[in-house]
Amino acid sequence: MIPLDELPSPPATALVHRLDDDAVERRELNRALIANHARRTGVIESSLYRVSYEPSSGQIVSLVDLARDRELLAPRPGIDLFGVVRERADGLSANGRYAYYQRDLDHEKVDLSCWQEWAPVRETPTRLLEFEIHESPTRITLERRLQAPGFRRLIQRLSILPDDPIIRFEAELELEPDPEPQGIYFALPLALAADWAACFDSAGETIRLDDDQLPGACRNWAAVETMAAMGDESGAVALLCPDAPLVQFGGFHFGAPVEAIERTADPLLLAWPINNYWDTNFPRLQHGRIRLRYGLVALDWLDRDALRKHGETFRQPVLTWPVTTNGQAPGSGSLPAE
């Protein structure tokens, strides 16, 4: 217990938000005259990260790890940091769950494949509805409300804290009532060299993708305990998953089983919070609003102890509570030794 007047002052931190202008020359409307235009880029910067975004679209174009002086993102069309992707079957060619899997119990009993080759349709948001930057002494939050296929409501919030190595991401979403098979992803397009490494935790152990997995184990996706991480010789990035455990490494892999994940440059790390692909005892329609949170942290390497520590801390943060009654003296009381 700490009295309010004895709480230490917060440290002075570099947490800033600014808009940078760039003069750009271009010719418009087939005129000979060249006009100067100011291109604006928004920047949110702490002592650990620098996030750059486009004010007109809300898209995040850069995430720099200042401690290691490296760019973490390799955005691609339609996919920026935590870019939303809706994956579904093409109803014109092969509709429903038979597009990718034709269930045959006689085959399944002897482990014969029922998977079908399929070409999924992947859709990204089509319009920015609202965009705001919320500033306070303890955090700066980028908030965007998007219009996207399959969604009634989609709000994303990205928060940078002064000296916190974890970038916080929150999503608030509501799906359209569509029983057809679909999957929802939040994508991280990472700037990694080819032959990157990856790991995740499960049942208290950190498992290296492919290297530590048994033959026949699922590599297309993983159900993690607290985190999934990818890295190369220049550094690593970990995705912390306290609310939704499914992830995919390298790219979109929902389909027939693979023996190993291809390690191409600039891969995707995919959070996979929602899908109704399977015939299970869960309803095909998910009603109501869903709120999810993720964390993102940069590291020197795929250090197992550091990854587990970040995952556990983010999953269960310190709980503080004001004590205003019963006259407890400061510092009194104790916690059990165990």
Image (cartoon, grey):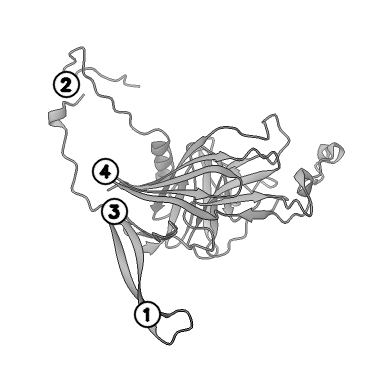
| Sequence-wise first label, 3 or 1 | 1
Alpha-carbon distance for marks 3 and 2?
34 Å
Query: Does the residue at mark 4 contact the one at mark 3 (Cβ under 8 Å)?
Result: no
Name the kind of residue labelled 4 in the image. Thr
Which disc is residue 46 wearing? Answer: 3
| Sequence-wise first label, 3 or 2 | 3
Alpha-carbon distance for marks 1 and 2?
67 Å
Name the kind of residue labelled 1 in the image. Ala
Alpha-carbon distance for marks 2 and 4?
26 Å
Q: Secondary structure at mark 3?
A: loop
Q: Where is mark 2, residue-wise? A: 330
State whether residue 68 appears in this view: no
Considering every residue shown, the one lying at the far top of the view is 326
Q: Position of residue 161 (x, y in %)?
A: 31, 46
Q: Where is mark 4, residue-wise? A: 138
Query: Does the residue at mark 2 contact the one at mark 4 (Cβ under 8 Å)?
Result: no
Q: Where is mark 1, residue-wise? A: 35
Alpha-carbon distance for marks 4 and 3?
11 Å
| Sequence-wise first label, 2 or 4 | 4
Above or below, comparing residue 309 to residue 17 in the picture:
above
Task: Pick whichever, 338 or 71, lies toward us.
Answer: 71
